[in-house]
Image (cartoon, rainbow, N blue to C red):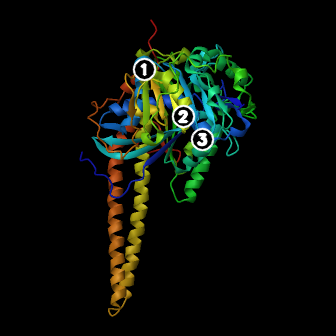
Amino acid sequence: MASWAPLLYARTLHDDTWWRAAPHDRTQDPWLAGQVRIVVAGGHDLDRHSRFLLAHDGESWLFGVACLSERLSSTMNQTGGRPTYCFVGWVSEPQADAAAIPPWKVLTTRWVPWAAGVYDRWLAPDWALSASDRAGLPHLTPYAPLAGSWPADAGQDDAGTGTGRDQLTPVSLLRHGTDAWPMSDAARLWAAAAASAERITAVFGVVRAQPQRLRGITHAAVLELARRQLVPGPAEPAGQQAKAGDGPEPRSRRGPGIAQLIASRLRGPRPR
Amino acid sequence: MTQPTAPPGPVKPLVITMLGTSLSGKTTYLLTMYGTLSLGVGRQSLVADPNQDYELGENWDRLSREGRLPPPTADEPHEYLFTFTHDLAPVAELDWTDFRGGAMDARVPDDDDSADTAQLIARLSRSDSIYLVLDGEHLAASPADDSLPATMLTRRMTSLVRHAIRRRQAAGQAPPSLVALITKADLLLQGMWEDAQIWRTMDATTQRVRTLLPVLSEAGVRALICPVSVGHLGDHPGGQVNPANINPLWPEKPVQFSVVAHLDAERDRRERERAAFGTEAGKLTVELARTRWLERRRRRALQTARQQALARQRSAEQASQACRRWADLLRPSLRHTPAYFGGEPGMGVEHG
C-alpha cells in the first residue's frame, strides 16, 4: 500500500517563511513547490472561497486545500492585523493508488477538521518564534498509509456524482490554457482527474475564469462559470506601448497649501 | 513647453526593487501607486499589460472600494512591467518585482526557504532604483532609535545596498537611486494640527531616516526620503479598513523620482559615450591626416570608422539631450520632497 505524507505551507506570526512541513525526500521538489504556489496564488480570493488541489506528476499524487488560516485555527490566523492563509495537503510516494484519494463529497464536507489537525500539529510549535529562532525548517513529515489519517469511508465514491467516467481535455490540447468546468460539476471533475494518468494540475474553487487567475492550472472548477469551456492561457506581457487616456488636471501642491495637504491626508478626522 | 522626443537607440528599462521587512507596506504601496498612477496624476500615468492591469486593478479595487488590505506576500515574487508616460508619450519602461519581506532576511543559498532571497540579491545589482521601505508605525512608536535598526532591518538594508553598489561599480555602472519610503506616514502625524509642528516632525523624521540609512548620503547616490500613506486607516482587524478613509498621499512621488534619477543617470552615461566617440573620431581624424594618399584601402577604412564614430557621437548627444529635456520636464513634480545627491540637497528640487 502506497504511503502519503502531509505538507504544510503557512507563515507564522513573526517569521516570513512559508514551508513548514514536507516529507524528507521532497523538501526541494520544484514540482511540489510549483503546485502549491499555483493553488495558493498569493492568497488571492481565499476570503471568497477556499481552493482545493488535485495534481499528478505522472508518478505521485498531491491533494489538499488552500484557505484562510482562520478556517483552521481560532488563534494562529493573523499577522500585523492581516489574515494569513495556508495550504494543507498530502503527497504520495510514487506509484500510489489514486483510489486512496478521498472523493469530492467526503473532502468538501470533512476537510476542516482534517486540515486543522495538520495545521496545528506542524505550526503550533513555531507560531510565536522569531525569525532568528527558526531552525531546521521545514519539519520533515513521515509517510504513512492515508487510511490512518482519513475517515474510514473515504475510499468510497459519492453516489454517482463523480464516477471518473467523464473525460478531461488532454493536457496536450490545452496549449497552456485551462479546461474550465462549472463549480456544480466539481465532483465529476475531481473523479475524472483522479482517474487521469497525465500530469495535471486541477484546482477547484477558482472564483472567475480569468486567464491570469488560471495560470498554471490545467483543469479548474470555477464558481462564476455556467458552462464548461477552454480558457486560453494568459498572454505574456508584450511591448509596453503607451495607450493611456488623458489624466486628470494637475493637482496644485504649491506654496503654503502643502502642509494642509499633508495634514488632510495624514492626520485623519479633526476631533470635535 | 515643447515635448521631448524619445531618446534614439534602446533605452534600458528602469529596474526597481523594494527592500523592507514583512508587513512594512510594500505590496499595499505598490497597489496604491498603481491604482493612482494608472488613472493618472496630472499629465503622467502608468500603463501595464492588460493582464497585469487586471490583477493589480482588481486588488486596488478591493482595497479602495471594499477596504480589504492585500494578503501578506508569499514566497513567490510578483513581476510587473509598466510604462511611465507623459502626455501619452512613453518616457521609461519600469521593471518592478514585489518580494516578500522575509526574502531580505535570509541566508543564501542554504536556507530551504530562501530561493527568492537569491533572486532578490541578484536583482539588487541590476536595479536602477531601490526602495528602502520603512514602516511609519515603527518610526512613530519608537522615539528613541535604539531598537529601530533591528526592527526595520536597516543595517541589513544598508549592507545589501552597498553590496549592490560595489557590484555595479565593478561593472562600470552608476549607483542605483535610493528611495527611503516611509509607509503609514499618517501614524507619524497623529494628533498634530499646527503647520509648524507638522514640518518639524517631517524634518525630524527625515534626519532620523538619514541616520538609520547612511547609504542615502554616500557619494554619487541620488536619494529621496518620501512619506507615503494610503489614508488614515486606523486599526484594521482581519485586514479590513473603512474604504471611506482611503485617501492616498504621494504614491506617485517615488516613481517620479526614480524616473528623473534614471534619466539623469542615463544622460550622464550618454554624455560619457558622446565624449568617448568624440575622442575616437578625433584620433581617427589625426590618423587619417597622417596616412598617405597612396594607402587608399587604409584611408577608406579610417574614413568609414570616423564617420561611424561621428554618427554614434551625434546619436549619444541626441539621447543625452532628450534625457535632459524629459528630466527637466518632470523635475517640478518633485518639488517639496527631500531629494539628495551625494548627501546634499540636490536633483534641482526645491526643499520644504
| Residue B237 % position (x, y) | 55, 14
Residue under mark 2: which chain is it in? A
Q: Chain of mark 3?
A: B
Q: What residue is at 62 percent from the left and 30 percent from the top?
A: A98
As measured in the structure, the alpha-carbon distance from the residue carrying label 1 to the one carrying label 2 is 48 Å
Q: Nearer the viewer, mark 1 or mark 2?
A: 2
Subunit under mark 1: B
Left of B178 or right of it: where is B281?
left
Residue B27 is left or right of residue B263, and the answer is: right
The structure residue drawn at horizontal position 67% and vertical position 22%, both measured from the top left corner, is A119
Q: Amino acid at mark 1?
A: Ile
Q: According to the image, label 3 marks what residue? A: B116
Answer with the quarter of the image where residue B108 lies.
top right
Say few, some or many: other residues with alpha carbon within 10 Å of mark 1 (under 14 / 14 to 19 / 20 or more): some
> Mark 2: few, some, or many residues within 10 Å (few <14, many ≥20)?
some
Amino acid on which the number 2 mark rests in the picture: Ser
| Residue B25 visible to the viewer | no
Q: Position of residue B333 (x, y in %)?
A: 36, 37
For residue A190, above or below residue B346: above
Give the amino acid at mark 3: Asp
Front-most of A142 and A46? A142
Q: Residue at x 49, y 34 (%)?
A: A217
What's the CA distance linking mark 3 and mark 2?
A: 33 Å
Identify the residue under disc 2.
A196
Q: Which mark is residue B246?
A: 1
Instruction: State the separation of the CA atoms marked 1 and 3.
Output: 31 Å
- Residue pictured at 28% horizontal, 50% vertical: B4
Q: In the image shown, does A206 or A194 lie closer to the viewer? A: A194
